[in-house]
Image: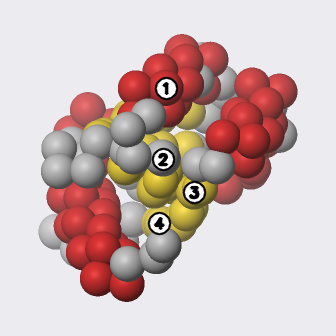
Amino acid sequence: MHDPDSSVSRRTLLAGAAGAALSTLASEAAHAEYEGGDVITAATFIHGIPGRAEDLKAHLLSLSAATRAEAGCVAYDLYQSPETPSEFLRIERWKSSDQLEAHKRMPHLRASFEKRQREGWTTQITVWKRVAEDR
């Protein structure tokens, strides 16, 4: 049964988590060499099954090393909601939108998409481009 109030609170929680994570990324000096380019940030919300968060977390973490080794990957980090453990946020930064698109075609990611569908996990992906500040 779908509880509309839980969807609203989940969206509020996820929006807050995304804002905090994106704010942190924007201020990190560690990636300063890419700030002037066409860096693309992808924020992905992954909605798991309550009570099965550890399965989803293990799967998502298994993608990290291979993804970070891909050409164009600047950052790839996973966050878990402390209030709703089956909810995850992944923040990725890529040197270009072409490299992000190439990532989506990689065998490990295609297999992950298929697994997510089989397991009933859903995702929402949004893509962002940093707004440069005049200094």
Label 1 element class? helix
Mark 4, residue position: 129
6 horizontally vs 53: left or right = left
Mark 3, residue position: 123
- The dot on residue 10 is none
Mark 1, residue position: 55
Q: Gap in Å between the C-alphas at discs 4 and 2? A: 27 Å
Q: Gap in Å between the C-alphas at discs 2 and 1? A: 9 Å
Label 3 element class? strand
Identified at 39% across, 65% down, the residue is 130
67 horizontally vs 129: left or right = right
Q: Which amino acid does label 2 sit on?
A: Gly
Q: Are marks 2 and 1 in contact (CB under 8 Å)?
A: yes
Q: Gap in Å between the C-alphas at discs 1 and 4? A: 31 Å
**Coordinates of residue 52 in the picture (x, y in percent):** 44, 34
Mark 2, residue position: 48
Q: Which of marks 3 and 1 is nearer the N terminus?
A: 1
